[in-house]
Image (cartoon, rainbow, N blue to C red):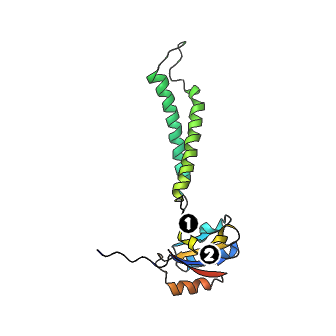
Amino acid sequence: MAHAAQPTQYGLMAEFDSPTALVSAATKARLAGYRKMDAYSPIPIEELNEALDLKRTRLPLLVLLGGIFGGLGGFSLEYWASVIAYPMNIGDRPLNSWPQFIPVTFETTVLGAALTCFVGMWALNRLPQPYHPVFNVDAFSRASTDRFFLVIETADPRFDAHATRKFLEGLHPVGVSDVAP
């Protein structure tokens, strides 16, 4: 059985010294037709979402659903315990005393939303990720301090090693590096 050849390159990485240069480069790359690319920055840059044409995250919907299910779960547990499992009629009060259930329902709503947010962020960001090909580039160690990086992956249909390198160099970066897998 023949094995597929291991790719020799993950992509090309351009290093920039300012956030405006990174946003400008990402916008130009998207307009040039590149779609499989990512940017790395030591600070949040709101304009990068539009420049990279990123889709909105599904996290708010997940958190809403987690809160709804948490609240329903808390209310259902109290209802089950008070009405079905251990009904006690004390002073001719109703078994389903819903005003009494509100504090616990609120707390389980918050708990469900918070846990969903915590787990959802890890899952949607594919964390933990102890290895990524960009870690192989020595200059990338400055990504958490003062440098901004744009990576165009070889998986992009428009990627051509020579043409993409020439395109990135035309964006006037500090440097362009090969990213090994």
Say which amino acid is labelled 1.
Leu
Specify whether residue 23 is in view.
no
Q: Position of residue 14 (x, y in %)?
A: 61, 78
Q: Which quarter of the picture shows residue 134? A: bottom right
Specify whether residue 142 is in view.
yes
* Residue located at (57% from left, 75% from top): 151
Q: From this viewpoint, which residue is outermost toward the left? A: 1
**Tag 1's secondary structure?**
loop
* Residue located at (51% from left, 28% from top): 78
Q: Position of residue 107 (x, y in %)?
A: 59, 36
Where does label 2 land, which residue?
Answer: 138
**Tag 2's secondary structure?**
helix
Where does label 1 land, which residue?
Answer: 54
Of the pair 3 and 69, the residue shown nearer to us: 3
- Viewer-nearest of discs 1 and 2: 2
Which is more N-terminal, label 2 or label 1? Answer: 1
137 horizontally vs 96: left or right: right
Of the pair 138 and 175, the residue shown nearer to us: 138
Mark 1: give few (<14), some (14-19) or many (20+) Cα within 10 Å: few
* Residue located at (67% from left, 77% from top): 16
Say which amino acid is labelled 2.
Asp
Q: Are marks 1 and 2 in contact (CB under 8 Å)?
A: no
Tell me the CA gap for discs 1 and 2. 27 Å
Q: Which quarter of the picture shows residue 84? A: top left
Depicted 165 relative to depicted 116: above or below = below
Of the pair 122 and 28, the residue shown nearer to us: 122
Q: Position of residue 124 (x, y in %)?
A: 52, 57
- Residue 11 has which mark? none
Of the pair 9 and 48, the residue shown nearer to us: 9
* Residue located at (58% from left, 32% from top): 104
21 horizontally vs 128: left or right: right
Q: Which image quadrant: the N terminus? A: bottom left
